[in-house]
Amino acid sequence: MHPAFQLLLCLILFMFLHISVMAICARAFGITLRQVSYGVGPTLLRLGTVHVKLLPLAGNVALKDTREETLYDDDPCRDAYNFQPLWKQVLLPLSGVAVLLVLSLGIMGASGWERFVAAFGQIADGALAPLSRAQDLLGDGEQFARTHGFAQVFALFSLKLCAFNLLPFASLNGGQALLTIIRGGKPYVAWEEPLAKWLLLPGLAILLAWAAAFGCYGWKALGA
């Protein structure tokens, strides 16, 4: 299987498991689901609250949350995410990553944990040098994909994405959990929104740097 096709399959499978686990966890906690989106962009298929979108690049689980919507005054909000106990608010955004991390470590064994820990430094190094260090890392990933089966490739890909999602930046699972801990699980604090905006910038910078790295690597591959 061509490495690019394996990457696409890994991305789709990771997104599906990640979003599904979070949605299941929310239901188990008694939190109302507003929308479960697989992918981004125009909606291709809608089944109740489930939306399947054009590009399998990411996904989203939208929950009942008084910070995002205006509710009736007589609504007790027991099924709203931001009214849940602190441990539920922290566990929910981390649930998808936790399941994928356990699954990937089960596939790769002891070496998987070393690769997971190394991923944090690799993400930073590649973002700081998208045209050099990131190119080397992507080359190592392609070589791994050419010499291993799909299960191993998916496990490695998942470990790297799990590390990225655990970074303490807004919009990422790690950032969501961190903000919840900082506000002590309170339903609302005035400073959360401006802080979240500042925490969004480093994550966006890293994402754009790696997008440039992938683009450059793909361009070189096409030229070759």
Image (cartoon, rainbow, N blue to C red):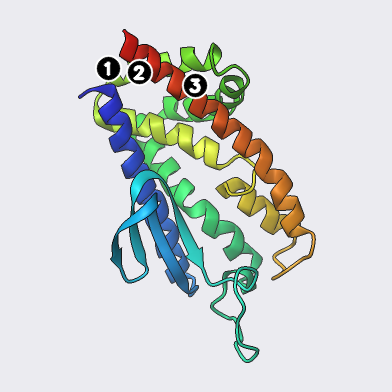
Q: Please tell me whether mark 1 sits on a helix, a strand or a loop.
A: helix
- Asked whether residue 39 appears in the rendered view, the answer is no
Marks 3 & 1, CB-CB < 8 Å contact: no
Q: Residues within 10 Å of mark 3 (few under 14, many from 20)?
A: many
Q: CA distance from mark 3 to mark 2?
A: 14 Å
Quick check: 124 left or right of 135? Answer: right
Badge 3 is on which residue?
A: 213
Considering only order in the chain, which callout, 2 or 3, is on the residue closer to the N terminus? 2
Image quarter of residue 104: top left
Quarter of the picture containing the N terminus is top left
Which is in the foreground here, disc 3 or disc 1?
3
Name the amino acid, label 1.
Answer: Arg
Q: Position of residue 34 (x, y in %)?
A: 46, 70
Q: For residue 142, which numbered disc appears in the image?
A: 2
Q: Please tell me which residue is depicted at 60% across the width and 38% down the height of the picture.
A: 204
Name the amino acid, label 3.
Answer: Ala
Q: Please tell me whether mark 3 sits on a helix, a strand or a loop.
A: helix
Badge 1 is on which residue?
A: 146
* Of the pair 9 and 115, the residue shown nearer to us: 9
Q: CA distance from mark 2 to mark 1?
A: 6 Å
Q: Please tell me which residue is depicted at 41% across the width and 54% down the height of the picture.
A: 19
